[in-house]
Image: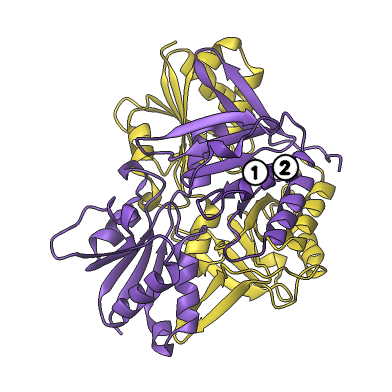
Chain colours: A yellow, B purple
Amino acid sequence: MSGRLAVVGLGPGDARYVTPQAQSALAGADALYGYGPYLDRVPLLAGQVRHPSDNRQEGARAAAALAHAAAGASVALVSGGDPGVFAMAAAVCEELAAGPPAWRCLDVTIVPGVTAMLAVAARIGAPLGHDFCALSLSDNLKPWELVERRLDAAAGAGFVIALYNPISRARPWQLGRAFERLRGLLPPATPVVFGRAVGRADEAVMVTTLAAADASSADMATLLIVGSRETHVIERPGLAPLVYTSRCAQGTPT
Amino acid sequence: MSGRLAVVGLGPGDARYVTPQAQSALAGADALYGYGPYLDRVPLLAGQVRHPSDNRQEGARAAAALAHAAAGASVALVSGGDPGVFAMAAAVCEELAAGPPAWRCLDVTIVPGVTAMLAVAARIGAPLGHDFCALSLSDNLKPWELVERRLDAAAGAGFVIALYNPISRARPWQLGRAFERLRGLLPPATPVVFGRAVGRADEAVMVTTLAAADASSADMATLLIVGSRETHVIERPGLAPLVYTSRCAQGTPT
């Protein structure tokens, strides 16, 4: 089978984050698949065809890209951030596992990128400087009880928590509920970072405390980082504060 | 104060992973600081001076870079992977918090990069496709009991676990102990990925099970990913297997 599929991470924002490996994978493709706004970030070369699709069609998009590659094309499927973190790489593996046996012979490459939590962390200091977890607040594909169990486990054991997919029109209450839950487990002064659209023109990054954190400050483009007991804020005259998690940890009280 | 400090992530391996933002920060520096082998990856431009330092001198290296920037230079401090994940950004914040008040007025930029777990995950499929955590097995700066508590919490709540700093000459037993601990919490068939030096000439990636995982297969350049109950392996004829974590999760038994 001569076709191939590259699942390409574009990073969080503009072209400054696109690695040379990703640029090369995009330039070598005949067909480009992806969520429309991500595809719009990719310069179209002569002979390339775009196949944009809607936001919540990950499975169908992955299957279409695999089928096109199996027909002999060189296909790039783009993802914002890193394709391996709450993005298209898992959808491709799921479709490949369930699809025709011939798909298992395809040349599939995953091209990593800078995922949102790394970009938000870099923008504000080093809040992910020590043990942390990444948790999706979406309960489309898992029960909400499991989200709460994971919040409890992570906060109880002292992990910093990066929250992906915090809120959407269809999921309006989950982030508020998560803050309530975390307020029962962490000190009120725990730093919370709201990082919106980092690396894009409408970027907005804000630091607050768990006590003051308000779910209505987040939207679909927001990534949140909730600190641990080792997360500190450095105030700077005339500059944005720095938030970091110390590399030294004590056994924390439970 | 006219000096500035950029803390720059080089990504996991060769130049394919260095973002345009990182390239530009490196090109604009007068002075380059970092662990020697990382500095060796950066092409030296006319007028630039290198200040290599040893592996375990993060605090002193960060302080030297800050002091040099405070004296008016444009300084780049390089990190492998992403500087915000078990790397130099937190060390810079710690030194800045403890250092002269003037350091708080410095122009400090963190330039994110592709951290090792993303590169290893991309190389093997999508094992970080759902909720996961990143945990350092080093007990240099935290008690080992805390590492065990975090392993228990993460595995018990169904997080995939990326293990940084799994082993070194000074820390020979920690990874074996971690495997023992995890064997008490997860099924024997749980996939485990050993990703060594991904993106470099001596790259080696191996998939095994938790039952068969052997700590002596890891060295200082290895990043491990231990799956959850939702992590699956796709065997492929003539190709390396794909490992992925399903986006769908059930409430797992505890």
Q: Quadrant of residue B227?
A: top right
Chain under disc 1: B
Left or right of A177 on screen, residue B2: left
Q: Position of residue A27 (x, y in %)?
A: 32, 32
Q: Which mark is residue B180?
A: 2
- Residue B176 is labelled as 1
The percent coordinates of residue B97 (x first, y second) are 50, 81
Query: Residue at image x 69%, y 52%?
Result: A168
Give the position of the N terminus of chain A as an image quadrant: top left
* Badge 2 element: helix
Q: Vertical placement of A119 versus A74: above or below?
A: below
Q: Is residue B73 left or right of residue A186?
A: left
Q: Residue drawn 58% across and 23% down?
A: A63
Horizontal relation, residue A122 to residue A213: left or right: left
**What residue is at 33 percent from the left and 80 percent from the top?**
B67
Judge whether B208 appears above or below A122 on screen: above
Label 2 environment density (alpha carbons within 10 Å; few <14, some 14–19, many ≥20)? some
Which quadrant is the C terminus of chain A positioned in?
A: bottom right
- Quadrant of the rendered image containing residue A21: top left
Disc 1 marks which amino acid? Gly
Which of the chains bears the disc numbered 2? Answer: B
